Structure formats: structure tokens, C-alpha cells
Amino acid sequence: MDGKLFLVPTPIGNLEDMTFRAIRILKECDLILAEDTRTSAPMLKHFGIDKRVFSHHQHNEHKATSEIIKFLHEGQKIALISDAGTPAISDPGFFLVREAIKNDIAVECLPGATAFVPALVNSGLPADAFCFEGFLPVKKGRQTKFKKLAEEDRTIILYESPHRLLKTLEEFAQYLGADRQASVSRELTKMFEETVRGTLVEIKSHFENNTLKGEFVICIAGKPNIKSKNKYEDDEE
């Protein structure tokens, strides 16, 4: 009988966000695949999880997947974790999940921590419909992406690194308008958690005068839908 692949979310900062079920699965599985074994080691030790841990990241996942599929066919239970949050959300994991499904191997994803959900809910921007962009292209296709997002009427969510944050905010102000409402969260669940809300220009000004440190989640209001607004106004009348 084939084994099972478990996708196990891990805390994005605060270890208290680990679920009881996630701990149990990690203790019961035959081996753990970690994005960076050095990063995961302290977390696993904290919860008393002593299992074989193999490295599984974007540079080796294609090469390693065939061996992992073989283990799963042999009946092993394997858990995949990323450095923080839910695997395959802007992290390695998609390719392995797809190959497991192709090979008729059961895949189970546990619910748990992921950075963009609290950032969205905490932003005060509409959360009934949104688009998650992960990380924007660094060079090729970047301008095209901004032009496309300028027409997006849903709340836009993306991740950004400290050294590109100001540039990204400036480009969004250029393509979407300086007065577009937005929210930027950093260090979510950690000691120095911070969320800054306002226009794109106001948020950029804030971070120009403060230390850029941590991981950032940007939430931006979608393009105002004037036709939709008028429709509701007509209905009310």
C-alpha cells in the first residue's frame, strides 16, 4: 500500500502558532522534508520531534522528487515543511505535490500559518475577493505585471523583501496612483510586528524613515469600480 504525503504548515514566527495536529503528524511520519534543515532544526527540537530530515528546496526538488515518490510507493509517510508557513505558497512544494497526484499517492494538507492571510484581514481592505501574487518578477515581465495589476479590481496581495520594498511601493504608486489605499505588514507574529496603513505614498514615506527589516506583506486596494458603485446607488434609490 502506498504511503501519504503530508503538507505541514509551520509558524511564521511565533512558535505558539504550531497546531497540535501538526506536531502529531511530524512525530508519526517516517521522514520530514525541510526547505532548510538548519532553519527547521530549532523548531523541531522545540517540539520534541526527532525524525530523519532531508533537504528539499527549489534547487534540488526536481532531482529529489523521483526518490521521494519511490519512498511513498513503498508505504512511507512523508511530511513536507517550509522554512515558515504553508508549503508551496511562494515556497517549494508544488512540483512534489503534482508528481504525487500523478502517481496516485494520497496528499493531505493541514491548515495552519501563512503570512498573507493575517496581513489581509488586518489591512482593513476588502477581503471577500483578492488576488495573491507572491513575489513579483525582479526584471523580466515586471512592467507587464504592474500594468496588469493596475486593472485589477480585487485586493492585491504580495510578498516583498526589505531591499526591494521602497522600489516596489514607488512603482505601484506610479502605475496604480499615489493615493491608492494600501497596507504593509512586517514581522507578523513576532516581537516587532508592525502594520502601516494609508496611501502608497504615505506608506513609502514611513519606511523611508524607518529601518527596513523582516519579511513584508503588501496589500493594495483594487481599482475602484465606479459602475458597480453606481449600480448599488441606483438600487438604493
Image (tube, helix red, strand yellow):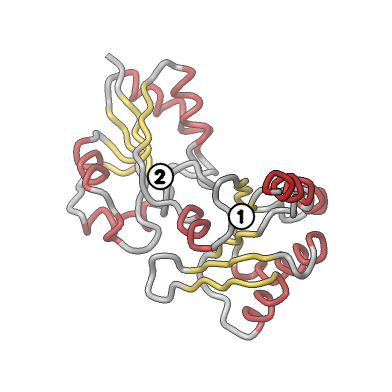
* Quadrant showing the N terminus: top left
Q: Nearer the viewer, residue 230 or 141?
A: 230
Q: Which residue type does callout 2 highlight?
A: Ser
Q: Position of residue 138 (x, y in %)?
A: 72, 56
The label on residue 176 is none
Residue drawn at (80%, 65%), measured in percent from left and top?
A: 177
- Closer-to-camera residue (97/145): 145
Q: Which residue carries the number 1 mark?
A: 158
Please tell me which residue is depicted at 49% across the width and 18% down the height of the picture.
102
Q: Nearer the viewer, residue 234 or 103?
A: 234
> Considering the numbered disc 1 on the image, is that residue within a helix, a strand or a loop?
strand
Residue beneath the point at 51% across and 46% down: 91
Amino acid type of the residue tagged 1 in the rendering: Leu
Depicted 180 relative to depicted 137: above or below: below
- In the rendered structure, the answer to whether residue 167 lies left or right of residue 59 reads right
* CA–CA distance in space, label 2 to label 1: 26 Å
On the question of residue 140 being in view, the answer is: no
Q: Relative to residue 153, is residue 99 depicted above or below?
A: above
Q: Residue furthest front?
A: 237
- Identify the residue shown where x is 34% and y is 39%: 110
Give the side of residue 216 with respect to residue 165, left or right. Answer: left
Q: Is residue 149 above or below residue 164?
A: above
Q: Secondary structure at mark 2?
A: strand
- Nearer-N-terminus badge (2/1): 2
- Depth order, front residue of 69/189: 189
Do callouts 2 and 1 mark residues in contact (Cβ within 8 Å)?
no
Q: In the shown orientation, is residue 91 left or right of residue 39?
A: right
Instruction: Classify mark 2: residues with Cα within 10 Å, few (<14), some (14-19) or many (20+).
Output: some
Residue identifier under label 2: 55
Q: Position of residue 14 (x, y in %)?
A: 33, 63
